[in-house]
Amino acid sequence: MTTSNRDALLHLLSRISFKLGDFTLSSGAKSDYYIDCRITTLHAEGARLTGLALLDLLHQHKLSPAAVGGLTMGADPVVSAVSIASAWRAAEHPNNHHPLIHGFLVRKAEKAHGTGRRIEGFFEEGAPVVIVDDVCTTGASTINAIDAAKQAGMKVIGALCLVEREAKGRAAVEAACEGAPFLSLYTANDVRAAHVAQLAM
């Protein structure tokens, strides 16, 4: 039986990114666990699996963005992983018309020099794009990126995150998406359960 990209990524994520303890989140809330997805998304195999698993999720939901983007810096490795994975898949299956998915990054504030843009990388007015992030708690980072993409004239057709913490973020992100889907590969409970299962082995 072949392990799916999603299952393989969950195994790695729960092993190296999930920690039990006493933590204060960026929102100020207390938590008995912390998920540092960057340890996985910046891991060589983790990056490969992140790109492939999110491509699979896009395909499953029939989303065909010209680009994916997100707020720096949690989204940075996710954006790169999806973009590179789309190029691998297109090269491996040239007759199946797998589209290239480009990437863009959203600055937290406009830079004061050069072009002064908030968006770096892909930029095309009217283009369909999907916003990505690693972890969604309040949804603030995802919403920030959604708003920036819309202000730049791009069309947000969805939002994806690796892990949804099952907090109040979903409703806020869905409102910002204005009818476009908000999808997650895993819930925090999925990652916790996989972590605990590995400890018991």
Image: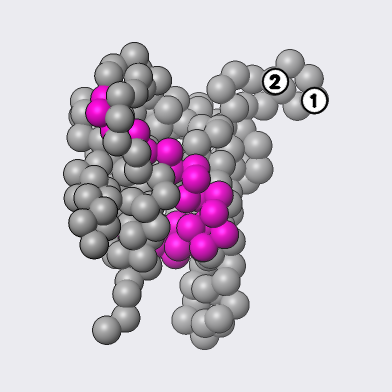
Query: How far, Cα to Cα, is label 2 from label 1?
Result: 8 Å
Residues at badges 2 and 1 in contact (C-beta under 8 Å)? yes
Q: Amino acid at mark 1?
A: Gly
Q: Residues within 10 Å of mark 2 (few under 14, many from 20)?
A: few
Please tell me which residue lies in front, 191 or 142: 191
- Where does label 2 land, which residue? 111
Which quadrant would the C terminus be assigned to in this image? bottom left
Give the residues drawn in magenta, as a range. Answer: 31-57
Q: Amino acid at mark 2?
A: Lys
- Image coords of residue 77 (percent x, y): 55, 47
The label shown at residue 114 is: 1
Which quadrant would the N terminus be assigned to in this image? bottom left
Whether 75 is drawn above or below 186: the answer is above
- Image coords of residue 49 (percent x, y): 45, 62
Q: Residues within 10 Å of mark 1 (few under 14, many from 20)?
A: few
Q: Please give left or right for residue 71 compared with residue 117 in the image.
A: left
